[in-house]
Image (cartoon, rainbow, N blue to C red):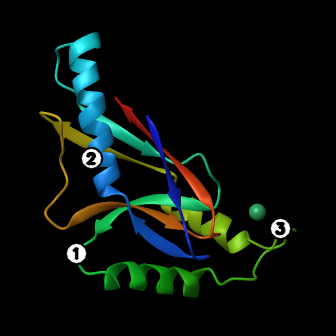
Amino acid sequence: MEFIVLSKKREEIIDITKEVRAAVKKLYVEYKKKICNKDIAACLVYVPHTTCAIIINENYDSDVHVDILEHLGKMVPVGIGKHAEGNSDAHIKSSLLGQNQVIPIENGELQLGRWQGIALAEFDGPRERKVIVKIL
Ligand code: ZN
C-alpha cells in the first residue's frame, strides 16, 4: 500500500502518522481475512527516494521539527559537495536519517509512544513523494 505526500518547501518535516495508521488498519484487516489469522508483528514505512527520509520523533511540539532541520542544516550545509545536481546536502541528510522505519504492531495498532509520530523529512522539495507501507 502506498500514498503520496506533496512537500511545499525545500526542507520540511511532514507528519504522516495519520496516513500510516490508516494504511496499517486497512492492511491489518486484509491480512487477517485473506492471509493468516496470526497477529502481525510490525510494519515498514519506506520512501523510494534519495533526498528525503522517514523519521520517528515528537510530533506534539512543532519546534522539535524546526530544531531537527536547523541543526541538520548546520551539520550539513546547503551548497557543499561535488555532486553536479547541487543537492549533496539533501542526499547526505537523507542517508543520515534513513529511508525507512519499522514500527511494532499490536492488535492492528501502531505501538508508538505517547509523544512519537511518524514523519517524512523533506530535504529537496517541493516534490511529490511516495510513501510505501508494508506489513511484516
Ligand atoms: Zn542529486
Residue under pointer 2: 21
Could you tell me residue 107's position as x and y percent? 12, 33
Instruction: Kindly tell me whether mark 3's CB lies below 8 Å from ligand 1.
Output: yes
**Left or right side of 124 for 30:** left
Ligand 1: quadrant of the figure: bottom right
Q: Is residue 88 above or below residue 39?
A: below
Tell me the tag on residue 60: 1
Q: Residue at x 21, y 18 (%)?
A: 32
Tell me which numbered mark, 3 or 2, is placed earlier along the sequence.
Answer: 2
Residue under pointer 3: 83
Please name the amino acid that badge 1 sits on.
Tyr
Please name the amino acid that badge 2 sits on.
Arg
Q: Secondary structure at mark 1?
A: loop
**Left or right side of 46 for 107:** left
Q: Secondary structure at mark 2?
A: helix
Could you tell me residue 75's position as x and y percent? 57, 82
Tell me which numbered mark, 2 or 1, is placed earlier along the sequence.
Answer: 2
Could you tell me residue 134's position as x and y percent? 40, 33
Q: Residue at x 28, y 44 (%)?
A: 22
* 75 vs 128, nearest the viewer: 128
Please name the amino acid that badge 3 sits on.
His
Quadrant the C terminus occupies = top left
Instruction: Kindly tell me whether mark 1's CB lies below 8 Å from ligand 1.
Output: no
